Image (cartoon, rainbow, N blue to C red):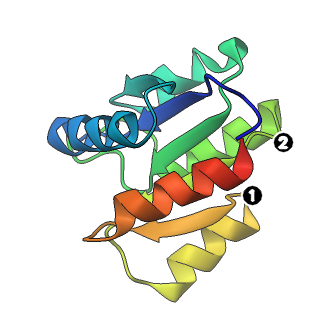
């Protein structure tokens, strides 16, 4: 990591997963400045704060039906800052979904599961 206190934004509408991922990352590296958002729209309002990396859930409208999905938020993030690393997080194991997110600029597609948090941490280390 080049930045000693990287800002990591976690965008997921599942509060328990968000809390667990936050705890895991802070356990790996106490210097993380972690901000969490329940919707992509909420995250977009904070892009001007220049986070170092965004972890973005693919399926964001399970709680708020009007919320945009991860692909739409990814496109908007890349429109505003095409160099910002975005890690997509999803429970979908579809190759088509994964390749679509990469095509729109995500640096990686992580499937929710046992090793997801460790994989995310390694990706953050390699990209900030």
Where is 83 relative to 123, above or below? above
Figure check: 125 above or below 64: below
Q: For label 1, count other residues whose C-alpha is less than 10 Å away and answer few (under 14), some (14-19) or many (20+).
A: many
Task: Please state the horizontal and vertical placement of residue 39, each as a whole percent of the image.
Answer: 39, 31
Going 54% across and 68% down the picture, which residue do you hit? 109
Residue 112 drawn at (x, y percent): 32, 66
95 and 65: which one is in front? Answer: 95
Location of residue 117 in the rendering, given as x and y in whole percent from the top left corner: 36, 57
Compared with residue 80, is residue 5 higher up or lower down, i.e. above or below? above
Query: Quick one: SS at disc 2?
Result: loop
In the shown orientation, is residue 40 left or right of residue 60? Answer: right
Label 1 SS: loop
Q: Determine contact: label 1, label 2, CB under 8 Å.
A: yes
Q: Earlier in the sequence, mark 1 or mark 2?
A: 2
**Could you tell me if residue 34 is visible in this image?**
yes
Q: Mark 2 — residue?
A: 82
> Toward the viewer: 119 or 86?
119
Q: Residue at x 50, y 31 (%)?
A: 9
Q: Residue 76 is drawn in which quadrant?
A: top right
Provide residue 116's location: percent of width, then percent of height: 37, 65
Where does label 1 land, which residue?
105
């Amino acid at each position: 990591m080049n930045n000693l206190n990287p800002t990591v934004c976690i965008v997921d509408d599942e509060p328990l997963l968000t809390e667990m991922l936050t705890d895991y990352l802070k356990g790996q590296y106490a210097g993380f400045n972690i901000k969490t958002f329940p919707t992509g729209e909420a995250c977009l309002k904070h892009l001007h704060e220049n986070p170092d990396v965004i972890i973005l859930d693919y399926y964001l409208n399970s709680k708020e039906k009007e919320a945009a999905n991860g692909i739409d938020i990814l496109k908007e993030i890349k429109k505003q800052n095409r160099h910002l690393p975005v890690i997509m997080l999803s429970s979908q194991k579809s190759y088509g979904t994964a390749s679509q997110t990469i095509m729109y600029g995500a640096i990686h597609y992580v499937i929710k599961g046992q090793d997801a948090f460790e994989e995310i941490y390694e990706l953050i280390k390699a990209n900030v």
